[in-house]
Amino acid sequence: MTDAGLALADWFTAHRRDLPWREEAARLDPYRVLVSELMLQQTRVATAIPYFQRFVARFPDVRSLADAPEGDVMAAWKGLGYYSRARNLLEAAQAVVREHGGRLPEDFAALRRLPGVGDYTAGAVLSIAFGVATPAVDGNVLRVLARFAGLDGDVARPATRKRVADLSAALSPPGRAADFCEGLMELGATVCLPKTPDCGACPWSGACAAFAEGRTAELPVKRPKPPPERSERTALVVRDGAGRLLVEYRESGLLGGLWGFPEREAEDAFEARSGVRPDLAGARPAGVVEHVFTHRRWRMEVFACSVARAADTPDGPESRDDPPPRPPFRWVTEAEFEALPVSKAFQKVWSTARVFTGG
Ligand code: SF4
């Protein structure tokens, strides 16, 4: 079994792509392995490279990240999406400082207790940084090993994933855990591709069941995913008399840690919550925005409006004395808005609404 594992580890050493998290110092640094693995969970390699370089230059170790204000961390992540990863990374760094003296633990259960660290990430950190052979099974690894072993089970089923994890552990050659782990990832990313596996270039072509049986197109077996759940929403882009925008910070949930535009709600409720009374009667429809998250699809009707002023306001409608909003709401200039961590969904809202709001 480990002959095949050794062949893969050697293939990786000879063919691996040069990536910033593959430099030897980075591979031996569990913090950098953790940062790269979290970035790569939902992001393509080419996109992640400059983000990784900037992130580790700005936060070179666990302590510098743990001490950073959340806004700085989110700003460094801005544009990568799936911002819960950034919040988890910050909270994980804080937990590592608090509970492990600033060093990531060389222990699967302790790693798994860190925010955002699942079986895959814990396995990758242990294998790559500590050289401890531990399965790290993601979609790429499921595909490669399901083909290699000719597994017919649905790869979404826990039983199949367990078989793949056991197979990975059995294949890992002694002393080469890091090269084997990254070799599996690299093979899945560059050779054993979903639709067009390049079996001629594969170090496992002589041992692979799917290749021998002509079943590479059939494997892995995957049941179709349910379509993302639809959600109908209404976003409100409100400007004050000075042209500033009303933004809201989301503490938790799908967009936790990010700023965005408020969602329209009953006038009284909105005023009570935000301290701002928008002119909802004068709100103009600005368009419709669709955004797909992993499991959800938002359809947002976008309305643009300004702040309502009572007729008896001393300075009348020209008043610049707009109400101070209550946290988590805030007035920001357009330049300030551009610098905030804002989800892609609300960036789309802004592109749709700015023309209707004088932006
Ligand atoms: S031989 Fe082909 S199907 Fe088998 S692991 Fe290699 S690339 Fe994938």
Image: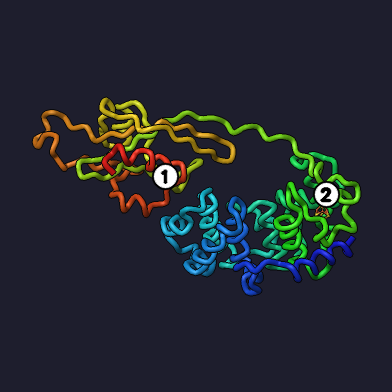
Splitting the image into 4 quarters, where does residue 110 fall? bottom right
Q: Answer with left or right where residue 227 lies relative to residue 133.
A: left
Residue in view at x 81 percent, y 52 percent:
145
- Up-down: is 189 above or below 13? above
Residue nearer the viewer, 276 or 296: 296
Q: Quadrant of the N terminus?
A: bottom right
Going by the numbered disc 1, the residue's amino acid type is Gln
Query: Where residue 191 appears, x then y in whole percent?
Result: 75, 57
Splitting the image into 4 quarters, where does residue 241 fall? top left
Ligand 1 quadrant in view: bottom right
Mark 2 vs ligand 1: CB under 8 Å?
A: yes
Query: Where residue 291 appears, x then y in whole percent?
Result: 50, 38
Residue farthest along the bottom direction in this orientation: 25
Going by the numbered disc 2, the residue's amino acid type is Arg
Give the mark count: 2
Q: Which residue is mark 1?
A: 347
Colour scheme employed for the rendering of this structure: rainbow
Q: Answer with left or right where residue 13 lies relative to residue 319.
A: right
Disc 2 versus disc 1: distance between alpha carbons? Answer: 41 Å
Mark 1: give few (<14), some (14-19) or many (20+) Cα within 10 Å. some
- Up-down: is 316 above or below 250? above
Query: Where residue 192 appears, x then y in whole percent?
Result: 76, 54
Helix, strand or loop under label 1 = helix
Residue nearer the viewer, 82 or 252: 82
Q: Which residue is mark 2?
A: 147
Residue in view at x 38 percent, y 39 percent:
352
Mark on residue 185?
none
